Amino acid sequence: MSPTGIDGSAPNAIEVRDLYKRFGRQQVLNGVNLDCPHGAITAIVGPSGCGKTVTLRHLNLLLHPDSGRIVIDGVDVSKMRGRALDPVREKFGMLFQSNALFDSMTVFENVAFPLIEKTRLSAAQIEKAVDETLAAVSLEGMKNKYPSEMSGGMQKRAALARALIRRPKILILDEPTTGLDPSRTGAIHELIRRTQQKFGLSAVLVSHDVPKVFEITDRLAFMHEGKMRLYGTVEQVTGAKDAVFEHFLAGKTGYDSEDALAKRA
Amino acid sequence: MYESIESLGAAIIATIESLGAVVTFLAGAIFYIFAPPYKFGLAIRQIREIGADSMFLIVLIAASIGAVLGLQGVNTLTRFGAEGSLGSVVSLVLVRELGPVMAALMVTARAGSAMAAELGSMQATEQIDALTVMAINPVQYLVSPRIVAGVVSFPLLTSVFDVVGIMGGYVVGVGLMGVPSSSYFNGIGYNLVWHDISTGLWKALVFGLVVTWICCYKGYNAERMATGISRATTEAVVASSVLILLWDYFLTSILL
């Protein structure tokens, strides 16, 4: 299955071509190709250490590729560095695995932070925007709490509100359900889907929550050994009869390479 | 043989790279002090945390050091019949040497360790990445204000240390040991000159830069785990303390 040309015509919110990255002697990314269509949720799944998070850290511009091309909303960011990236960064919101809420600030201050730092809105405008966004993630009435006073699920909602406050075009989510119990996982997935539709976002998320994440994703990428092994709709990927993917899905340990599987067969 | 040469070369390259990273970090932090958007509010908040909040500790340590200097000074000077020089001895020792060094060591232990732990914890919980992703330069937001605060606070804290220490020496030397008050203050008036004061303040300024630089660097580059934060904090305090003493010798030799 090719990682390109999902529906042929629409330009993608994010396009990655032949992305390579090495840390020391370890080649982590081996030519990643990925398309994240506009207005859709793209999920990247795969075994631990396959390069999902490193790929995501290229998409949110925290890492720069050794080679390859990354195009975000039509802008090729592969060679861009420093403050030149700021206008691109303002196109996306990011939900971190650990939420990355500033623990010295209240929920209101956390969510308002990007507006205070990066816009010239008045205090009243900021308060209105924060209230609206907190309502969108069902956190009304919590704005004076500190992150340490809230549950993991609520912290996740607050972090999502901060990611959404500047109304980004693209939302990037790193393991959004890590550390949550199954019922909260479902609620966060539902919230991601709801906010993605409400704000018309293009979302890309890395998740280990398989197969639950299949319920909300429009495109699924299965990553293995630094490459996108499978890409397409959930039906296409799950119907591909790929031994490595099925092995991963079955939750077996080891996540064998093709060679190991071939030997076993 | 070949492997040992290779590992030696790798170690030398790694050392040069890490030294380069430390210097580049400071250069970036200083550059962003002068680049918009200016972070006056954050610098003021850091001056409060590093400076004002350290005041009680500085007063406590300065008073006890001054008192000990008074006690030791009277006992030693009496042997030479020179107890009238107590004011000169206490003030010169404090202003030129003990004030800047002790104030810097105390602030390193209190505020420097907190700085390294706070930035280390922000690194571990992706808060520094969050700033970058929000198009906010984390060095400008977190490090530059602390460097400014260190450079402003350390000389002020040193001044307080000097004055309180001299008063501590007065209370013990004059109040308890019977040295004449006039000789104490006359000694200070005749022997303590502006050069002595400026030497101490220059030292404090350099220590303020070194401590905030090293503590921020260690915290900012902490490994993303609990042990990484504790290691960064320990290394920050040890490295800052050693550098304070090394720089003290170096500055004394050129400012003497």
Image (cartoon, coloured by chain):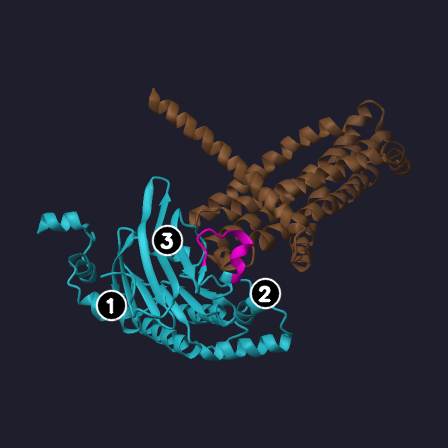
Residue under label 1: A211
Say few, some or many: other residues with alpha carbon within 10 Å of mark 1 (under 14 / 14 to 19 / 20 or more).
few
Q: Position of residue A14 (x, y in %)?
A: 39, 63
| Among numbered discs 2 and 1, the one appearing first in the sequence | 2
Q: Earlier in the sequence, mark 3 or mark 2?
A: 3
Chain of the residue displaying label 2: A
* Residue position for label 2: A118
Q: Colour of chain A?
A: cyan
- Horizontal and vertical percent position of residue B239: 56, 37
Discs 1, 3 touching: Cβ within 8 Å: no
Task: Say which quarter of the image contains residue A23.
Answer: top left
Query: Residues at badges 3 and 2 in contact (C-beta under 8 Å)?
Result: no
Give the residues in magenta: A76-87
Which chain is assigned brown? B
Q: Is residue A185 visible?
A: yes
**Residue A211: in magenta span:** no
Q: Nearer the viewer, residue B246 or B93?
A: B246
Label 2, secondary structure: give it. Answer: helix
Residue B66 point in image, percent of width and height: 75, 39
